[in-house]
Image: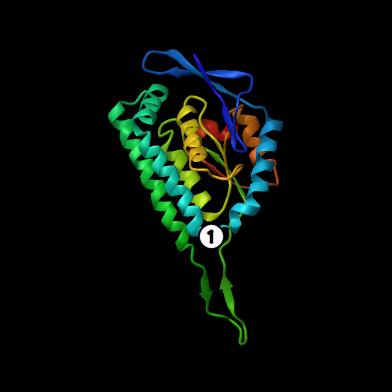
Amino acid sequence: MKTYPLYLNGAFVPSEPVWDVVNPANGEAFARISTIDRPRLAQAIGDAHVAFAGWRRLTAKARGEYLRRIAAEIEQRQEEVARLISSENGKPLAQSLAEVAMSVDHLQWFAEEGRRAYGRVIPPQAEGKRNLVIKSPIGVVGAISPWNFTLMLAVRKVAPALAAGCPVVLKPARQTPLSCIALAECAQAAQLPKGVLQVVCGPSDQFGEEFLANPLCRKVTFTGSTEVGRVL
């Protein structure tokens, strides 16, 4: 049974303990995923913050090129990634292939949208004043994605953040982490700078607390059930 490492600061790192990944179609464990604890998550957030300085300085066009390269890698591996989604999620292969296609589309879309993060000029309320709004990246984003559209909803969080100049620490659902590891593999193949995207697994309550309490994590995006949201 294969054990998948996590993607931390540009490298795939095996760690203990490991969790079983179960195929819901037959109830059998078919893979294992590495996990980390809260202090190691804090280190990942710190590494993302270090990467932020360089990532934000790139032009939106340059960041978009990385997203397009990740999309091309996923598209090249679409059959493999779709089968991984079906194995961990249980949906039919045709639906998994559609999810991969939508994920590619999201990456391509946000590769272009990053170039359109326009500011605003606001009519002043006082004579001699000029009011401008300039949009700038906020910093490290903690992203928590659900099990039902395990790749697409992860990409929907990751792609706009990266396009805007924000590094992402992505925590997939415990039941379905492997397609997000595949996303990390594609990011590495696209030569995304280290620390810009990391994929972590571990205890949800501790991770949620760290995302919310760590001053280097400037934004959190979460999709999931009310039950899990209350734990976070």
Position of 93 with respect to 112 (left or right) is left
The percent position of residue 208, horizontal first and vertical second, equals 62, 35
The percent position of residue 100, horizontal first and vertical second, equals 36, 37
Rendered-image quadrant of the C terminus? top right
- Looking at the image, which is closer to me, 166 or 145? 166
Inspect this view and state whether residue 51 appears: yes
Q: Residue at x 67, y 42 (%)?
A: 47
Q: Residue at x 67, y 27 (%)?
A: 37
Q: SS class of the residue under badge 1?
A: loop
Q: Residue at x 52, y 75 (%)?
A: 121
Is residue 24 positioned above or below 82 on the image? Answer: above
Position of 83 with respect to 225 (left or right) is left
Q: Dot 1: few (<14), some (14–19), or many (≥20) neighbours within 10 Å?
A: some
| Amino acid type at image mark 1 | Thr
Position of 132 with respect to 155 (left or right) is right
Inspect this view and state whether residue 217 appears: no
Q: Residue at x 65, y 53 (%)?
A: 53
Residue 23 quadrant: top left
Is residue 18 positioned above or below 64 on the image? Answer: above
- Looking at the image, which is closer to me, 134 or 52? 52
- Looking at the image, which is closer to me, 103 or 125? 103
Q: Which residue is mark 1?
A: 59
Is residue 1 positioned above or below 228 on the image? Answer: above
